[in-house]
Amino acid sequence: MAGFASAQHIAPIEVDDICVERFVAALATLGEVADPKAHDRRLRRQWNRLRATLPGLGLQELKIEAQMRARWTYSETEFDVRFIAEIAAYSAWLADDNPLADNPGRGLRASTIKTIRHQLFKAATALAQAGRPLETITSVADLVSIDSAGALLGVLYERQGSKRSDALHRPRGIPALPRPRLGEVRRACCHKAPSHCGQPGAEEKSAGASDQGAA
């Protein structure tokens, strides 16, 4: 960028959005960058960081367009109000650090709860894409039956390119799923990943022992 600006007799304080666009277009024409748009964004971020670090240079702030991502999940507002309310109540329960509450211990961080909320709505979306009508998903309980868990994990597995993932093969992130059922969920999903249905994991062994003990 410095060389380009010098060749064009452009002073640092004169560098603006149009100048950057011309520079990136020149790089793209010469085949110097594989992804011109990504290079453009990196350049603008670095320039603005330099501007903030050395305000005495008088550099202009460059505009960075919001990056739009194609989403496959439904927005939260598209779900049944009962499902939304239950997720909100569950999130509040996770945040509660009252030692006298029914979830003793420290409340989870806001970022952790946000991730869990996303995972729940993602799981519900996967269940809907597996064929369950969206309007019939009214509770977290709808995600954790054997059939539902197998169906939604199958969708997530296919979206991941049919690659092994501990998050999918050991579904600990699905709330309220009884431990003795982990083995059943694995068996329900085996047709999606037959090569990964060998020896059970430690949790499944523990679950199996629990089943035998109960019997």
Image: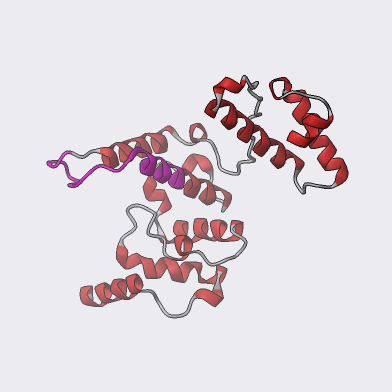
**Magenta span has 83?**
no
The magenta-colored residue range is: 98-120
Position of 27 compared to 55: left or right? right
Residue 84 x/y as whole percent = 41, 35
Is residue 2 shown to the viewer in this render?
yes
Taking the spot 67% from the left edge, 36% from the top edge, the residue there is 43
Q: How many labels does the image show?
A: 0
Q: In which quarter of the image is the N terminus?
A: top right
Between 93 and 51, the one lying in front of the other is 51
| Residue found at the very far right of the displayed protein | 29
Residue 190 x/y as whole percent = 51, 71
Q: In the figure, residue 81 lies in which quadrant?
A: top left
Question: By what rule are the colours in the image chosen?
Answer: secondary structure
Between 179 and 137, the one lying in front of the other is 179
Residue 140 x/y as whole percent = 38, 46
**Residue 30 drawn above or below residue 168:** above
